[in-house]
Structures are given as structure tokens and as C-alpha cells.
Amino acid sequence: MSQSKRKKHRFPTAYTVIIIVLLLVEILTYFIPAGNYATLAYNSDSNDFVITQSNGDKQNAPATQKVLDKYKVNIGINKFKDGTIYKPVAVPNSYKKIKAQKPNLWEAIVNFFTAQVKGIGDSIDIIAFVLILGGCIGIVNANGAINSGIAALSKKIKGKQVLLIVVIMAFVSIGGTTYGLAEETMAMYPILIPVFLMAGYDTMTVIGTVFLADSIGTMVSTINPFSTIIASNAAGINFSHALPMRVIMWAFCTFIGMLYVIHYAEKVRKHPETSYVYDQYESDRKKFLSSDNLQNPNFTWQQKLTLSIFAIAFIVMIWGVQSQGWYFTEISVIFLAAGYLMAIFSGLDEHKVIAAFVNGASELLGVALTIGLARGVSIIMDNSHTSDTIMNFFSKQISGLPPLIFIWLLFIVYIVLGFFIQSSSGLAVLSMPIMAPLANVVGIDRASVIDAYNLGQGYISLIAPTGLILMGLMMVGIDFSKWFKWCWKLLVIEFILCLMFLALGLLVY
């Protein structure tokens, strides 16, 4: 009786959560007026600006600082010409409501399904990466490389399990704060899950170690070009001005995150029944650990070479994203090439290699579809022209407030905006020309506005179903409800820390 009762109250799957969010956003657009800011974009081919008015009319203007000053866009002309600002920038004080016919019931239903299909289409590069990654993992699993490697590693880390958490969280958080490591972390879960299980931890520790570290890193971005740097440029200031303070913020927040994860992980290692996913204890070990390879850890040269190729692909991916500007097409190519090499040296015959690749890709198909569905939220917002209306509303509400109240409310505003606009660079170029001048009105440094933007969008990423959390949870097989129960205390701690650092920033900058 109690088991059936529990089943009835299970938290919805990731698909259902995103569909509910899609429905709510679709309904919300009926009550939010349509409107647009005028935008200014640089055309490198013709070396001029394209000004798009609120009503959609376009006109060209010379690419000069005089034109930027005319439209009160406080950004140096060189930032457009060198490619630093590569997206259309909102023109301050240009918001206007537009006439947009609200869809009838039938049109709304069509829009609801169309947004999902278009979301999958728009996310095809990320989806390709996920499926190819899954195929590579399938090959690594098929020849027993992961489990044999874990069995050998488990002997070396015995008594030093905490170092796993410290090293990995430091590595991932550094990636997040420096170059915006995000979707790429999905490559880490299949490797780390068996490692952590062998160390006596659970799958919640894995998601906490990887996703939490990444979220904290991006939340307190220091030199991340996709958030801090592009936002600073869009605000018309030098990002290095506030760098020392942000480094301190990042180190402190990462340290607190480590303590939170270690406290939980060690409690689970000593008392497994305290795990938030204890009901999955046996099934997780059966799924992620192969008893044959663990009992007989014969680490063959083919397995070592297979793991080495996979590790090298991961290292090349990080190098390419950080220094070469690679995106998902390029890193998909890297892992596809790694898949070919692993197929040759894995010791498996052709039939087993193909079966392993296809099976591995199929296991991540759910993750890939979730990414596409989540993109549908942005599509609904864009099609309804409501994002700019929300931005205009909030900017008016907080303008002219006392400095401390202003920056705290701006942080909350960015939490809301970050829920709907998941692109950090997109949110930066849309909001900074609007929000940054408000700092002058209340008499604070614009660097504080950048901090509020970073902290707000990073904070909401911990629980926003439109972000990466649902994908990460699917990788480790955990319900969102369990994740929230695990992290809600940390959410409170991080919220208070953000308010404290924002207040401190007013004194430092």
C-alpha cells in the first residue's frame, strides 16, 4: 500500500517539467504586452551598423563612435570591429510596445508544438555532441575499460576519497569562471559515476561535485568571455577593474560549495542509509558497476589505450573551447574522431563496436531531447516579443532606488531574467545597455551591475528547468525533487553570500 502511494506522488520526469514550463510561459505571453527595444548590430562585411527599430524597420549607419554616442550605446567602436560584441545590442530608452495579435486557442496549440520542434532543430549541434559522446562512452564501456580502470584506481584512492571531490570541483569551477565550461561537463558524468560509487559515495555526490562546481564557477565569473567580459564591454567598462574582488568571491563561494558536498559525501560513505538516493543504492551499482570487471581487474593494454584516447579527446576539447573559440561542431568532430580511434584499438570486432556506439548514443537520447525541449522556452518568448517587455518593466521599477536596495533588487531581477533567458551572452547584450546606465543614476560603479548579472543568472541555474540541471540529473538518474531537497540549504547560503558580496562591492569599487 505504501509503495503504491509513493509511486502516485513521484516527481514528474524532466520532459514533463519542461513541458509544464513551456505551457506556463505560453500562457504568460497572453498577459504580457508585446514590445521591443531597438537594436544595433555591426556588419563586418559592409563595415556599418544595422539599426533595427522596435517595429522591425531597418536602416544602416556608418560604423563610427559618433553613431554609438548618438544612440547612447556606451561601448567603444573597437569592441564591435574586433568581434568582442558580436550580437545585436539593445539601444537604451528605445523600448516601444508593438501591435502583436495574440494567438487564438488553435494557434497557441500549434505554437506550443512548433516551439518544441524548432527547439530541437536549433539545438542540433549540442544534440549531435551528446549523441556522439554517448557513442564513445558506449565503446569505452563495451571493452571494460572504465570498470577495469576504476578497479585499479580504487586501490590508489582508498583513504583519500575526499581529494576526488576537492580536485574535481576545483578543476570544474576554474573552467566555469574562466571560459564558461557548461554543456561540456556532460562528458564527465559517465566516467565519474563509477569512480564515486567505488569510493563509497552516491550519484548525488557526483551531480553535486560536477554541476554545483560548474554553476558556482559561472555564477562568480572572473574572466569568462561569454559573461563577464562581454557584459563589461556592453556596459562600457573594463572587466579587469573588478577582477581582484571577483577572484576572492569565486574562491570563497567554491570553498563553501566544497564543504557542502564533502560534508554530505562523507556522511553517505560512513552511513549509506543517509543518502538522498538510498532507494537507488543497489540499482545504481548494478547499472554503473560491472561485477565481472571489478572482481577481476585485468587492465589490458587495449583498455588503457581506449581510456587514454577518451581522456585526450576531453583535454583537446577543453583546449579548443578555451583558446581556439571552438563550439559544439568542433568538439563533436573531436569526439567522433576519438570514437574511430577507439573502435580500432578497443579489441572489439566491427559488429560489437557499432552495437556499442549505437547503444551508448541511445542511452543519452533522452538528454539530447531535453536540451531541445528546453530551448523551446526561449523560442516562445522571442516569438511573443515579451522578453524586452519584462526587461523594460524591471528597469523602471529599480531606477533611482538607494544604492544597496538597488543592487539587491537588481540581483533578484537577474534571477528572474536568467530563468527565461538562458544564454549568458544574449542576456548581457540585451540587458547591459539598459541596466548599466542605471548605476550612474543611483551613484554606484557599473562593475556592481556586472556582479548582479553574473550572480543572478548563475544562482537560478542551480534549479532552473530551462538550464542544464535537468540534463545533469538525467545523466545520473536522479529526480529533480531529490536534487532540490539536497541543495535547498545551499541555495539559502549562496543567496546570503551573494547579497553580502554585492554590498561589499559597493564599498570596494
Image (tube, rainbow, N blue to C red):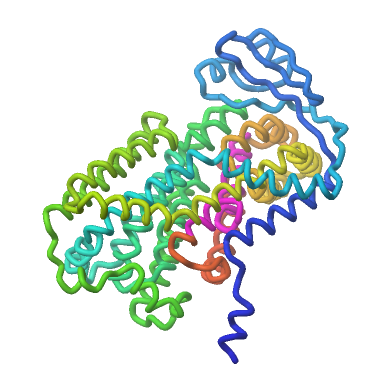
Q: Quadrant of residue 452?
A: top right
Q: Is residue 135 left or right of residue 427?
A: left
Write down the quadrant of residue 88 in the picture.
top right
The percent coordinates of residue 367 (x first, y second) are 49, 54
Instruction: Give the number of callouts.
Output: 0
Q: What x and y, as percent, mark residue 172?
A: 39, 50
Residue 291 in the image, given as x and y percentages of width and height: 24, 73
Residue found 40% across the figure and 52% down from its top: 361
Which quadrant would the N terminus be assigned to in this image?
bottom right
Residue 70 left/right relative to 190: right
Q: Residue at x 36, y 36 (%)?
A: 333
Instruction: Give 242 or 51, whichever is nearer the viewer.
Output: 51
Question: Can residue 399 be seen in the rendering of this structure?
Answer: no
Is 252 situated above or below 46? Answer: below
Decide whether residue 456 is among the magenta residues.
Answer: yes
Residue range (magenta): 446-472
Vertical relation: 234 (above or below) 1: above
Residue at the outermost bottom position: 1
Q: Position of residue 215 (x, y in %)?
A: 49, 52
Say which residue appears at 61% left-offset and 21% top-offset: 75
Foreground: 33 or 291?
291
Residue 321 visible within the image: yes
- Looking at the image, residue 237 sits to the left or right of residue 292; the answer is right
Nearest the camera: 108 or 327?
108
In this rendered view, identify the residue nearer to me: 445 or 204. 204
Quarter of the image with the C terminus in it: top right
Residue at screen point 11% across, 53% down: 301
Please indicate whether residue 281 sits to the left or right of residue 396 in the image: left
Question: Farthest residue in the front direction?
Answer: 351
Q: Give the vertical position of 284 relative to 99 (above or below).
A: below
Q: Main secondary structure of the magenta part?
A: helix
Queried whether the magenta region covers residue 72, the answer comes back as no
